[in-house]
Each structure stands twice: as C-alpha cells, then as structure tokens.
Amino acid sequence: MKRKNGVALWRQIADRIRTAIAAGEYDSNSMLPPEIALAEKFAVNRHTVRSAIAALAEEGIVQALQGRGTMITRKERLNFPISKRTRFTEGLSDQARDMEGLLLFHSIEAATATLSEKLRLPLGAPLIRLEILRKVNRRPVSRSTSWFPADRFEGVAEAYKTSGSITAALRATGIDDYVRLSTVISARHAEADDLADLELSPGAILLVTDALNTDMEGTPVQYAVSRFSADMVQFTVEN
C-alpha cells in the first residue's frame, strides 16, 4: 500500500476498507477478511489493521463478533434527499444514532458579485457567513459555508450555535418555513481545510452542493456551498 504523507496509516487503511465495503467487495458473506489477511494485503502489522477496524466500528460500519470475526453492519452510504424542503437533520434522522451541527466560526463580509446575484442584494451588501461542520454518528459528514443577508438575519449565528440547526436558526430570526429554489451538484477533490475537518485522506473526493433557499414569498434567505464526503453520502433528488 502506498503511504500518504501527513495521514495516519490506520486511517488510510480504514478509508480503503470503507470504500471496499461501499463497493460491495465483501458481499459474499458480509464479513471482513481476517486481520492477518488484511495486514498482508495492505503490508502493515495487525495492530494497524486493528486500529482501522476499531475506527470503523465507532462509525457503526462494522461490528466485532466474539469468535467469529468482524461483521459488516452498514454497506450503503447515507442517503441524503434533496427536495423542495431539504433539511439535513430530517433527511438523515432515520439513518443515524446521533447528529451534531457545529459552528466553526462566523463573520460579516461584503457581498461579492456572485453572492449579490444569488441573494439578490446590492454589490457589497453586508452578509453573515457561517462555517459549519456536521457530524453523523460522531463522524464528520459535511462542511458547509452559508451566507445570509445581515440586515434581515441578525442573531442567526448565535441561534445556530445554540440549536445546531439551520431550520431552528431561521425560525429564531423570523422564518417559519423556507424552500429550496435550486441545487447544483458537482464533485471535486478535497482541499486542505476540508481534508482536516472531514478527517479524510489526501485525494479524497467530495460531493458539492450549491444551494439557494428562499422564504415562502420567493425572497432568498440563504446561499450555501456544502461539501460531503463522497464515500459516506449519496444524494437522492426528489420531485
């Protein structure tokens, strides 16, 4: 196995095993190969393989069975629905033991040409920017950057910090309901910040959504660019 600088070897092994599980490589009996076989395959010692398997067990992907080996308990990716009312928590609630939304930082910045067009605001209008990390079953799943019109959503950062929910934060600032106007989906390699926050290995692929939400009168309330770990999440676009 080719080592990647700056990434713990056990994490690289865990990523490779997770990808193999998602690809159905171990579907014949729903069990991982023995530790010694995995150690030989990846040219590492059994302790490294054991650490990788322990990390996958923490994610709920595998489970150690006394005297039987390691059973695969989750083969499929998390399924994230994109619809008229796309909500992170509601979309994944039936697939996760626990979910967490963390506000990494927030700031006030002037609208660029792109942001002013998206949010239908004058160039240079003040925006509130939120940088958010979302975890599912204690594992980072998405990293997002959101912008809100500052004049309308004062306090949205504190509301999100308290609730961990965009829906709750918008409700706290006067928006009882909102809808998804558009979503553009693309894929790219993860950059340094996303690699660190999402705990990914160099070369990892991200699924990226550019999303615009509006209030019920059609006025933009949030523009967000979200990056998802491609080996953990798949999208379903619903009519």
Image (cartoon, rainbow, N blue to C red):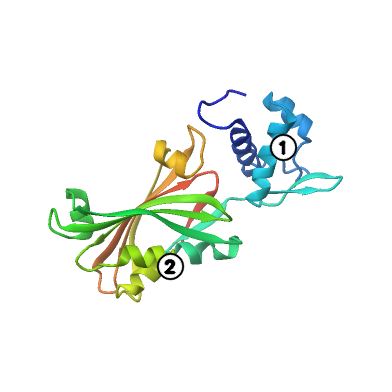
Q: Residue at x 50, y 29 (%)?
A: 6
Residue 163's disc is 2
Quarter location, residue 44: top right
Q: In this rendering, would 14 be left or right of 183? A: right
What amino acid is at disc 1? Arg
Q: Residue at x 85, y 45 (%)?
A: 68
Quarter location, residue 128: bottom left
Q: Secondary structure at mark 1?
A: helix
Q: Residue at x 76, y 36 (%)?
A: 33
| Vertical relation: 166 (above or below) 205 | below
Mark 1–mark 2 distance (CA, rounded to whole Å): 36 Å
Q: Secondary structure at mark 2?
A: helix
Q: Is residue 191 visible?
A: no
Disc 1 packing (10 Å; few <14; some 14–19; many ≥20): some
| Vertical relation: 103 (above or below) 188 | below
Disc 2 packing (10 Å; few <14; some 14–19; many ≥20): some
Image quarter in which the N terminus is found: top right
Q: In this rendering, would 20 be left or right of 140? A: right
Q: In this rendering, would 96 be left or right of 147? A: right
Earlier sequence position, callout 1 versus callout 2? 1
Instruction: Verify CB contact (< 8 Å) between mark 1 and mark 2.
Output: no
Quarter location, residue 157: bottom left
Residue 50's disc is 1
Q: Is residue 124 visible?
A: yes
Residue 138 coordinates in the image, percent (x, y)? 57, 54
Q: Residue at x 34, y 69 (%)?
A: 170
Q: Nearer the viewer, residue 213 or 59?
A: 59
What amino acid is at disc 2? Ser
Image quarter in which the C terminus is found: bottom left
Q: Nearer the viewer, residue 2 or 196?
A: 196
Residue 205 coordinates in the image, percent (x, y)? 47, 39
